[in-house]
Image (tube, helix red, strand yellow):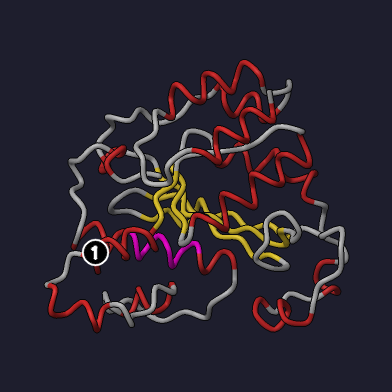
Amino acid sequence: MVTRLINSISRKPPLAPQNWQAMFQEWAKDAPPGPLKRYYEAGSVASDTPLKNTPLLALDLETTGLNPKEDEIISLGCVSMDHRIIRCNDAGYWMTKPEGTLNAESVTIHEITHTELAEAPPLHRILDEILNTLSGKVVVVHCVAIEREFLLEAALNIYGFPLYFPVLDTMHIERLALNKIPWWKRIIARKLSLRLDACRQRYHLPRYKAHHALTDALSSAELLQAQISYHLDPDARISDYWL
């Protein structure tokens, strides 16, 4: 069952609308008893829910590298939100000790050292709490290939069963927005960065220090709200935008 599920996930067109409710119901039947099964049993947001009524959770991870199959999560930050409000009092931040060692290149990016992680719990001790935080939310990220894929691999390692969930990807939204500009401006647009800070600057959002999981989660939340104001329809179905 697990192999079949992983194969079905990998075959899904990345931009196709997903019937997440039906998928969660199916996965809840086969997930092992425990937190992951409860997560799927709680269900997903209905696909016809208006964007403005959708409970959202901005999420960011810092990792030891960019390969979900080889690298590990070392910190997670999240903040709940909707299309107008960011609830900073609900923010969460965790550090987690990896099984392997940190490499110098990643340390220069996220500035998290072995000393800081020495007393941090391993991921398997906090993933239950993270699942509770994700439950019932559509997750907001900047680059779906990081957050969703790393958590997928983490769940496989810890529970022996995949974790998969609906996402609003601010990088993807920005790419689509740039593709809609007049053709004679596209030569310039192709050179525009899709990095989080660069996207935020196009909406005149404040500049924050990058590569802290909670700060980047907040940055993604603010970016999504700006994108909704300029490019998305708050009354449209969430299924028009999620991946």
Count of number-bearing discs: 1
Quarter holding residue 65: bottom right
Q: Position of residue 126 (x, y in %)?
A: 74, 46
Q: Is residue 219 magenta?
A: yes
**Kind of element beneath mark 1:** helix
- Residue of label 1: 177
Q: Position of residue 78 (x, y in %)?
A: 54, 55
Quarter holding residue 20: top left
Secondary structure mostly seen in magenta is: helix
In the image, residue 183 sits, relative to residue 233, either above or below, namely below
Q: Residues within 10 Å of mark 1 (few under 14, many from 20)?
A: some
Q: Quadrant of the C terminus?
A: top left
Q: Is residue 234 magenta?
A: no
Residue farthest toward the top in the current orientation of the protein: 29
Q: Nearer the viewer, residue 231 or 92?
A: 231
| Residue visible at 35% across and 65% down in the picture | 223
Q: Position of residue 207 (x, y in %)?
A: 41, 81
Q: Quadrant of the N terminus?
A: top right
**Span colored in magenta:** 217-224
In the image, residue 50 sits, relative to residue 68, either above or below, namely above
| Residue visible at 86% across and 69% down in the picture | 101
The three-letter amino acid code for the residue at tag 1 is Ala
In the image, residue 28 sits, relative to residue 109, either above or below, namely above
Quarter holding residue 110: bottom right
